[in-house]
Image: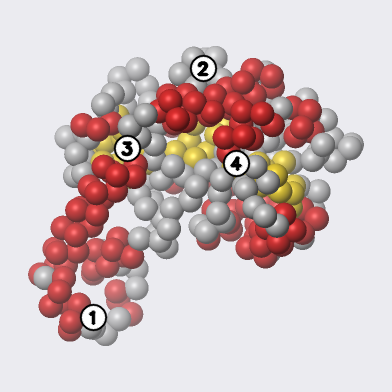
Amino acid sequence: MLDIGDEDSSHPLFYLPFTKRHYPLSELEQNAKHVLYPFITGWHPKLFELAGTDFKRITELKRKIVGRLKETWILVENYEKASYYQGLMHFQEQYQYPLRIFTLNYDLCVERACSKAKIERGFNETRMLDVRRFEDDQDQTVDLLLYKVHGSIDWKKDKYGSLTFSDEAGSVSVRELEIIFGTSQKLQYADPYLFIIHEFRKYCRKAKLILVIGYSFGDDHINGIMTQALSQDSDRRIVSVAPSQDGEKLKQYIADKLSVLPTQVEVVLETAKTFMEQTLHLDYLEKFVPLEESIF
């Protein structure tokens, strides 16, 4: 998402990779803590039989699934395959302003591929979370400001319950792993999640051009925030980068998912790799901006 024609000095770019699906076990695991629990006269007897006392078996099953996902899906064995993420760093070098990047992924592709850039992830010198580091008035030089909406494979809680991170993502146990899945109750009332979603909404409403890469538009919460921003300004555009055989069909699909005008939707029928390696340039994005606006 590229903020164009705004006086904000950060001039953010928002990047939204592949979204995660709903995760019903997280809902069941809440049991009596679930927001709907007071309105339910009773759970199905079979569920109690299978879930066990206080739904402990659901927690155990969830932990096993997360462990399996961590081993086979979240952890990346060879980050060289993600070297095309360097396109974000190269774009920032052209743009000459810090880029704000929002990702739904848990992996470390941006951090590893753009290691030569100065990346702000919200942790201070003592490795503890400090969201003030994302503020514009911080006395620091930053190239990329990286917001991990659902957490990160290297995030963990210390013994006091405060968020920190590990240099060895693979060493973070399933119990320690600090990530959230795309549930219907995803708005967590704690930092950094609440802060990140607030930042996402703020910069969506400031942007003239919203750039999304490899996003399936399957997350209603993220979609809702973008819909509000697009509906607020009919000149605001969203550009979706995704391979497809039918660009017009994809454009209409996105317009329907976001409940916006098709004229506000542009599609680039390329893979994320091709786009970030070959296409992501200032002059290319500028053609999606209204003529009276400037990219600088």
The image position of residue 98, as x and y in percent, is 60, 23
Image quadrant assignment for residue 182 = bottom left
Q: Earlier in the sequence, mark 4 or mark 2?
A: 2
Q: Is residue 85 left or right of residue 180?
A: right
Residue beneath disc 2 = 117
The amino acid type, in three-letter code, at marker 2 is Ala
Q: Secondary structure at mark 2?
A: loop
Circle 2 crowding by C-alpha within 10 Å: few under 14, some 14–19, many from 20: some
Residue in the image at 39% along x and 40% along y: 106
* Nearest to viewer (mark 4 / mark 3): 4
Q: Tell which tag, 4 or 2, sits nearer the viewer.
A: 4
Marks 2 and 1, the one that precedes in the sequence: 1
Check disc 4 and report the residue beneath it. 271
Separation of residues labelled 4 and 3 (CA atoms): 21 Å
Say which amino acid is labelled 1. Answer: Trp
Count residues near mark 4 (Cα–Cα under 10 Å), then give few for <14, some for 14-19, many for 20+: some
Horizontally, residue 76 falls left or right of residue 296, namely left
Q: Position of residue 229 (x, y in %)?
A: 67, 51
Residue 64, compared with residue 160, is above or below; it is below
Give the number of the disc on residue 75: 3
> Which of disc 3 and disc 4 is earlier in sequence?
3
Q: Can you tell which mark lies on residue 43? A: 1
User: Which of the marked residues, 1 or 3, is nearer the chain's N terminus?
Assistant: 1
Q: Could you say where residue 15 lies in the image, as x and y percent from the top left? A: 57, 38
Q: Earlier in the sequence, mark 3 or mark 2?
A: 3
In space, the residues marked 4 and 2 are separated at their CA atoms by: 24 Å
Q: Residue furthest right?
A: 292
